[in-house]
Amino acid sequence: MSLVKRNKLPWGFSPMFSDFFGADDLTFDNAFNRDWVPAVNVAESDKQFEIEFAVPGMKKEDFKINIENNVLTVSAERKEEKEEKKKNYTRQEYSYNSFTRSFTLPENVKHDGIQARYENGVLTLDIAKEDVVVSKVKEITVG
């Protein structure tokens, strides 16, 4: 197992070009990154969980959020096509981004108490908690 991360670059570019073109910046590396997964923050308070996804450039219609068997799944898909026609040429560009993230929810979550909002490139899910009822222990004697 290697501890060195190596960026896979298309068309045989060497890592030297990766450093030159700034592969850590959002333009060059992400243009060829097929395994994009957004960064996620999870916060917990007494009353709820809050999950934030960093997904700039998407629209709220791009997201699909569902719960099945106590697993919350958030996915998004965005397709874009651009065509520019000039006198001597035609240029077409296509882009496609998608991701899926799944979270196993704890037992104290209200499934009907989940709200989602998308603002300024951040998808936020507010997941309400139920009050956990601690059952009393009752001792039964054998007679």
Image: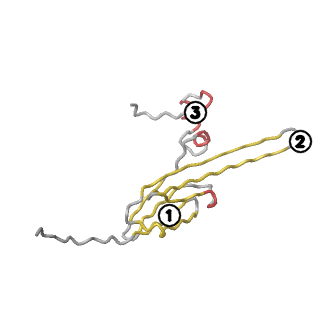
Say which label, 1 or 2, has the lower sequence index: 2
Sort mark 1 into few (<14), some (14-19) or many (20+) by Cα contacts within 10 Å. many
The image quarter containing residue 138 is: bottom left
Q: What numbered label is drawn on residue 21? A: none
Q: Secondary structure at mark 3?
A: loop
- Residue on which the image places disc 3: 9
Image quadrant in which the N terminus is located: top left
> Residue type at mark 1?
Leu
Sort mark 3 into few (<14), some (14-19) or many (20+) by Cα contacts within 10 Å. some
Q: Secondary structure at mark 1?
A: strand
Distance from Cα at disc 1 to Cα at disc 3: 34 Å
- Residue on which the image places disc 2: 87
Q: Secondary structure at mark 2?
A: loop
Q: Position of residue 27 (x, y in %)?
A: 61, 44
Q: Nearer the viewer, residue 138 or 53?
A: 138
Image quadrant in which the C terminus is located: bottom left
Q: Residue at x 40, y 69 (%)?
A: 129
Q: Position of residue 89 (x, y in %)?
A: 84, 39
Say which label, 2 or 3, has the lower sequence index: 3
Q: Position of residue 140 (x, y in %)?
A: 16, 70
Q: Is residue 8 above or below residue 74?
A: above
Q: Is residue 116 left or right of residue 140?
A: right
> Residue type at mark 3?
Leu
Q: Residue at x 41, y 68 (%)?
A: 48
Q: Position of residue 72 (x, y in %)?
A: 48, 58
Q: Is residue 63 above or below residue 32?
A: below
Q: What numbered label is drawn on residue 125? A: 1
